Image (tube, rainbow, N blue to C red):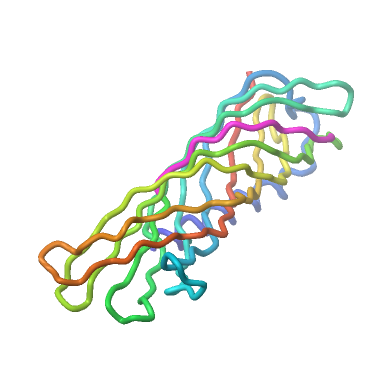
Amino acid sequence: MTRLVSTHVIAALAAGVLALSGTTALATDFEGAYVGLSIGSAMGEGTHTPSGSATPYGTASTDTEVVGGVLGWNQRQGDFVYGLELGLSTGLSDGGVFNHSCACSSMRLNYQSSIELGARGGWVSGDTLFYGAVGAAYLRYEEIFTSTSAPSAISMKNNDTVPFLGLGVEHGFADGWSLRGEYRHYFGVSTSNPATAFPGSLTTLSSGTRDYDLGVFAVTLTRYF
C-alpha cells in the first residue's frame, strides 16, 4: 500500500512538471539558498555471502519508500549553475526477504536512513535545469535474520559511507519554486556480521557480508530564497 501511494504521488508530481513546462514569466532562476521536501523509492538488491565462500546464501530486494529533505545553495553564471547540497532521508517500509540456501534462516533488508553531502552542476534551458550530482552518503541499514528451526530473530544495524553519482532535471514553475526528479546511484555499499547465535536456539548465524546494488529515485519540491 505504501509503495502504491508513493508511486501515485511521484507520477502526479511528474505530470505537474510536464503541465507547467510552458511557464516562463514567474520561473525561478535556480540561484541562491533553497530548501526542499522529497519523496521517492530506494531500489536494488543486497546479496549475502558467508565468510570464506564465493557462493552467496541469497539475494533480496532493497526496495523501500523514502521521504526526506534537502538544504542547499546555488550560484549561477550565465546558463551554468553550480552549488552544494545537504540531504537527509528515512525509509518508510521494509525491504525484501530471502531464505538462505541452507534452509536454516531467512533475512530481511531494511533501508533506514541516509545523510548526504554533494555538489550539483548543470545548464539551464528556459525554465529547466539539467544537472549532474556527485558526493558522499552515510547510509544506515537494518538486517533481520530469523531462524526456521526455533523461530527467533537477530537484528543487526549497520552503516557505510560511500560515494554517489546522480542525474536530474529541475523545472521552475513559479517565482522561487521548482520541482525536480533525480536518480542517484551509490557505489561500494557493503555491511558485515560476526558469527552470532540465535536467542534460545542452537542455530548459529555464520559470519558474512552483504553487498548492495543501490539506487534512489526521488521527486523534490524546492523553495528558493
Quarter of the image for the C terminus: give it.
top right
> What residue span does the magenta drawing correspond to?
112-123
Quarter of the image for the N terminus: give it.
bottom left
Which residue corresponds to the image point at 35% horizontal and 57% vertical from the top-left?
Answer: 143
Which residue corresponds to the image point at 72% horizontal and 39% vertical from the top-left?
Answer: 171
Q: Magenta stretch: residue 56 in it? A: no
Left or right, 2 with respect to 39, comes to left
Which residue corresponds to the image point at 48% horizontal and 55% vertical from the top-left?
Answer: 6
Indicate whether 142 appears above or below 198.
Answer: above
Left or right, 166 with respect to 37, comes to right
- Residue 104 in the image: state x and y as whole percent: 27, 77
Of 55 and 24, nearer the camera is 55
- Residue 9 in the image: state x and y as whole percent: 52, 53
Q: Magenta stretch: residue 114 in it? A: yes
Left or right, 80 with respect to 97, comes to right
Which residue corresponds to the image point at 80% horizontal and 35% vertical from the top-left?
Answer: 122
Left or right, 187 with respect to 154, comes to right
- Residue 219 in the image: state x and y as whole percent: 59, 46
